[in-house]
Amino acid sequence: MGAPFLITIATMALHSSLAVASDPSPSQDFCVAINDPNTAVFVNGKICKYPKVVNADDFFFQGLNKPGNATNQQGSNVTTTNVNNLAGLNTLGVSLARLDFVPYGLNPPHTHPRATEVLFVLESTLHVGFVTSNPPNNMKNQLFTKTLNPGEIFLPFPLRLIHFQFNVGKMNAVAFAGFSSQNPQVNTIANAVFESNPPIFLDILTKALLFDNKVID
Ligand SMILES: *[C@@H]1O[C@H](CO)[C@@H](O)[C@H](O)[C@H]1NC(C)=O
Ligand SMILES: *[C@@H]1O[C@H](CO)[C@@H](O)[C@H](O)[C@H]1NC(C)=O
């Protein structure tokens, strides 16, 4: 024991505090997920399948060539891969989604509680943007936007910030999003605020959003 030992501890502490920004790095080549409710083993992710019985299908997903059905109220549909439908993603800290939009379809303002996102447009034209969290000194939250054509990407929609994508083209849009998590999750702002169960008291929403009750209703 002594200085080297203390430095090791300090380094470990530093590493673990940095690791909270995204999924932790895996400590093995892979850790294919297994659903076993009878085991009492808990890890950050799912427990691993025995390596000798892992096969190529554990790392394989098909179907992202097919559009999701975007004929709905928002005019968008997200087809996700994550650790629940692609077990090999477990502990690897990445995943991919396909986004489909009808003309003027919107992927409404939302956050991903666990991931930064990078967006690639394949077809049509998407107006995309994200908003910073509250800055100091009563400055306004800053909006960053870009209008993307096929072949263009918008660099990370940063971790947990509110963002959106809107198809401003006259044709169906297709885009792909990469995530820095095996399971980025989605938190849609309007659903959380206006459609919770039970609903948030009207007076709270009115005061928070400076609308009158009728608008909120
Ligand atoms: C998205 O598309 C899938 C596949 O077509 C469909 O099953 C699902 O209901 C759609 N989701 C929404 C929100 O429209
Ligand atoms: C897409 O969803 C809409 C609304 O639910 C439905 O009417 C339509 O048949 C679906 N289209 C396909 C191709 O499944």
Image: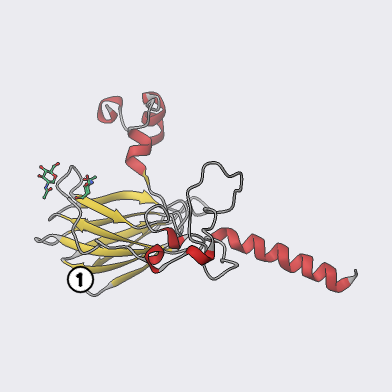
Tell me which corner region of the image, top left, top right, bottom left or bottom right, holds residue 97: bottom left
Residue nearest the observer in this picture, 143 or 10: 10
Identify the amino acid type marked 1: Asn
Q: Is residue 9 left or right of residue 193?
A: right
Tell me which corner region of the image, top left, top right, bottom left or bottom right, holds residue 216: top left
Residue 77 x, y percent position in the rendering = 23, 51
Q: Residue at x 41, y 34 (%)?
A: 208
Q: Is residue 23 left or right of residue 55?
A: right
Q: Quadrant of ligand 2?
A: top left
Q: Quadrant of the N terminus?
A: bottom right
Residue nearest the observer in this picture, 205 or 136: 205
**Number of other residues with Cα within 10 Å of mark 1, as a class: few under 14, some 14 to 19, many 20 or more:** some
Residue 69 x, y percent position in the rendering = 17, 50
Q: Residue at x 59, y 52 (%)?
A: 43
Q: Residue at x 49, y 54 (%)?
A: 135
Helix, strand, or loop for circle 1?
Answer: loop
Residue 27 x, y percent position in the rendering = 60, 67
Residue found at the far right of this picture: 2
